[in-house]
Structure formats: structure tokens, C-alpha cells
Image (cartoon, coloured by chain):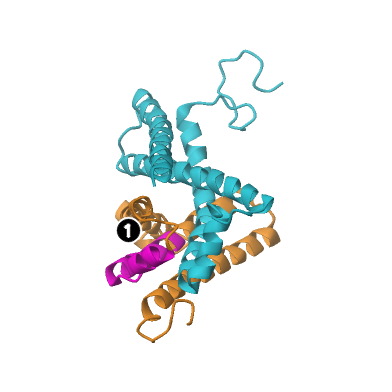
Amino acid sequence: MAGNEPSARPRAPHLQVYKWGPAMAVSIFHRVSGDGLAIVGGLMFLWWLGAIAAGPDAYNAFIACVWHDPNPDAGTFHMVTNLVGKIVLIGLTWAFFQHLFSGLRHFVLDAGAGYELKTNKLWSTLVFVGSITATIAVWLYIFAETLNG
Amino acid sequence: MGNGTRLGRVRGLGSSHHGSAHWLQQRLTALGNILLVGFLFVSFLRLPMTDHAAVLRWASNPTVALALILMTVSVFWHLRLGLQVMIEDYVHGEATKLLSLVLLNFYAIGGAAYGIFAIVRIVLAPAAGLAPGGM
């Protein structure tokens, strides 16, 4: 099997046999998070803007679907969409921070800096640490605000 | 075309005649996105998001509305460039590639137009003497 025999030769960059490292992972997740923001984030942003423009009823329907249905007789459908909505919003928050921090790393690389192996590995790792930490911090804040009022 | 010096080659923009425009636009819109999406993100955290009246009051402020329009342009321009690269890298059939790029342009241009029109409706509905949604 390609990639399994002990060899000093460099291996072909197929994902299946590629040795995962922070630098290649951050590059892949830049694309994944960009896709998610572009399609899911873009559509949710347009849905939200359209709901604001369409008036209070449309906006309340949007909130009842994505976030919380204040109706005490809210059905299972909204219970499911409220849960999915929160998961999607948490995912988008992570994608936002991942793409932002990874994008800042690209600006540094564009300037020709940060290509030394250790430096590259360090900043790639820090992008993941930063995006996960920021996402947790933001959602702790949101849930604390929601519970307090 | 200037095939002689390195500078000449850059000025000649190479065989595609586009040179670094795509690359540069992606960086410029990225810079715009940092500022404008950053503003939107902080606004999301500070606004009472479930309150339509409060969100409407915020969005109909002229400065906020202008920032939202600029953000929509910057974001949809940036995502068109980014998804274009994704399609070019991973969609291989000529026909599916062409179709994907056409759909991408529909989404990017149509999405931006929908977003900007929604912002205009939010801002101008009171000026036209209409309740929100009446436009």
C-alpha cells in the first residue's frame, strides 16, 4: 500500500495517505469554513435581512424557527429547528473565527513571513486554539445573557 | 507584452490578461470583511436579537445601513472569488464546471442584490409612509 512501506522518499499528496499536520489542516479548514460561511452564513444573513424588512410577523416567525418559539404550544417541529438553528449558529461562529484567524495568517504569509517550519506549525496550531477558544467564549456569553434576561 | 524583464512580464499580465486581479481583489475584500463583518458580529452580540423593533431601529440608522450595504458587497464579492477557486479546483467536468460557475454567479449577484434591496426597504419604508413590510 502506498504510504505504508517504510521509505525516506517524500509521499504523494493524496489526502488518504497524507500525514496530517497543523499547517495543512489549517489550509483545508480555511476552505471548509469559507464554504460554510459563503453558503450557510450567506443564506442565513439574507433570510435575517429579508425578515427585518418584511415586518414584525415575518421576523418573529424567523426567530421562532431559528432560535426560540415563545408559544407555549410550540410543536416538535420548532423544537427540532430551534436545536438545529443553535447548532448551525455555533458552527457559523466557529467558521467565522477560523476563517478570520486563518485569513490573518494568510496576510502574514503574503508578506513573505512565517514560513519557517516551527513558526508555521506554531501559528497554524494557534489558529485552531484561537478559533475554538473564541467560539466557546462567545457562546458562554450568549447563553449567560439569555439566562439572565 | 514585455517578455524581457520581470517587471515587464508583470505589467503584461501574462497570457490570461488578468494578472493578479483575482488575488488582489480577494485580499482587498478580505480587509473589508474584517472591518464590516467584525462590526456586524459585535452588533449581533450587543443587540436584543429577538426584538424586531430594536433590530429595525438599529438597521434603519443611515450609518449602520451604509455599513450593511458595503458589507453585503464585500462579502458576496469575496465569496464569489473564493467559491470560484473551489469550483476550479474540485469540479472537473467541463459542463459541470461551467454550470457550477453560472450558478455561483447567480447566487453571488442575486444574493447581494436581495440583501441590498432588503436594506433599502428597511431604511426607506418610513420615508415612504409605510409600515415595515409594506414596501
- Quarter holding the N terminus of chain B is bottom left
Residue B93: image location, x then y, percent: 69, 55
Q: Nearer the viewer, residue A80 or B36?
A: A80
Name chain A's colour: cyan
Identity of the residue furthest to the top in this view: A6
Residue B133: image location, x then y, percent: 48, 77
Residue A97: image location, x then y, percent: 41, 42
Type of residue at label 1?
Gly
Q: Is residue A54 visible?
A: yes
Give the dominant element type of the magenta stretch: helix, strand or loop: helix
Q: Quadrant of residue B61?
A: bottom left
Asked if residue A45 is among those painted magenta in the image, a careful observer would answer no
Identity of the residue furthest to the bottom in this view: B128
User: Relative to B29, is A145 above or below?
Assistant: above
Q: Nearer the viewer, residue A101 or A21?
A: A101
Identity of the residue furthest to the right in this view: A1
Instruction: Give SS at disc 1.
Output: helix
Q: Is residue A144 left or right of residue A32?
A: left
Task: Tell me the residue that label 1 is attached to.
Answer: B8
Q: Nearer the viewer, residue A71 or B116?
A: A71
* Residue at mark 1: chain: B
- Identify the residue at horizontal 53%, vertical 52% (top origin): A68
Q: Is residue A2 left or right of residue B106?
A: right
User: Relative to A147, is B96 above or below?
Assistant: below
Name chain B's colour: orange
Q: Which residues are magenta?
A: B52-76
Q: Is residue A50 visible?
A: no
Asked if residue B72 is among those painted magenta in the image, a careful observer would answer yes
